[in-house]
Image: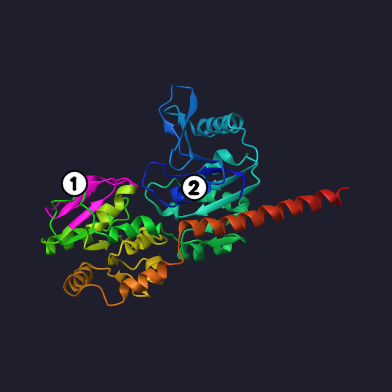
Amino acid sequence: MTQDIICFSHLRWNFVYQRPQHLMNLLARGSRVFFIEEPIFNADAGSHYFDAFEDPLAGVNIIVPHLAPGSTQKDIVSHQQDIMADLLQRYNIRNYISWYYSPMAWTFSHMLKPVYTVYDCMDELSAFLFAPPELKTNEHALLDHADTVFTGGRSLYAAKKDLHDNIHCFPSSIDKDHFHSARNLQDDPEDQRDIPHPRIGFYGVIDERLNIALLDEVSAARPSWQFVLVGPVVKIDPATLPQRPNIHYLGPKRYEELPGYLSGWDIAMMPFALNASTQFISPTKTPEYLAGGKPVISPSITDVVAPYGELGLVFIADTSAEFITVTEDILLTGIPKGWLSRVDNFLSGQSWQQTVSEMAAIIDEGIKEKKGLMLKKQKSYV
């Protein structure tokens, strides 16, 4: 791929490091990448502009639109269209791919003329808390215009496969070297150092997907177990989270810091609720925890059960009683013989670089086919 990439994201670049950051970071090695964040409403009345800065490590250009508070929906769309036109001119962006994570961006970007359009559907965003009601309408429009669609997991692929004729499943992948370092016991981060063992840890966004009741019940039933949660609290009131001496909320951490926390845990957990917001998730932390060599406990999330649970790589527990039973067994007997070898064998063929290479091959072939069709159409008019 030699084209510039304009990426429309619902996640901010400096938020939790997730799929968009992994992929855009790698794509920026061969293309100019412009990462368009959602607008911030802090501009003077009647004005709009954008900030641009480059991530010095990733080489990605981060674009932050600024709009005036109280802008009408019509103005929000119009001003973002102005910003996009200014962006194209300022950076001389002509030969580019439009890459969508947020269907809501379609409202102001549909007038663009990319050589190719990608919809990387990493989550069923319409099921998330506070999702705008018009999200599904915009997603249908995006699906109608996208040249190819990628999905972030198997269940999401099954749900979307009949909505587009060029759709491909790319489940969450892994930066193995980064998380493999957790297998070598590291010095505990300062805010985790004095927490006793056994430690059962989680890192990620703490939001409506968290099973608050399970965390509360298990921490109450086993006060000697220490529950460590690393990550920002968003969309929910922090006061609703269970507060006990053995629950430790350590706040958001940089991606570079995560192996250090993971290294000091005895067990990694994914305490997700089974609800509409988790129906199609494919947690990136699943292979990350495993790469770190930690036993993982998860509820029966579809994309965790298959393949991880079915292969015996992840322990499945839906209720508090099941969680306690599984944890006690791990703490008493350790992980099964051969488990780590099977983990390494499973992860051996996975990497974000491999994912990017396969995606790029699909896109390059698609661009080639589009050019061929255009040339054939032009000849038919001669």
Closest to the observer: 259 or 204?
259
Farthest residue to the bottom: give it.
337
Residue at image position (58%, 29%) is 90
Badge 1 marks a residue whose secondary structure is loop
> Looking at the image, is mark 1 or mark 2 earlier in the sequence?
2
Which amino acid, mark 2? Met
Closest to the observer: 321 or 227?
227
Residue at image position (32%, 71%) is 340
Name the residue tied to disc 2: 24
Q: Is residue 173 left or right of residue 372?
A: left
Say if residue 276 shows up in the picture. no
Taking the magenta stretch, the answer to whether it contains residue 26 is no
In percent of width and height, residue 204 lies at 32, 52
In percent of width and height, residue 84 lies at 56, 34
In percent of width and height, residue 128 lies at 39, 52
Name the residue tied to disc 1: 190
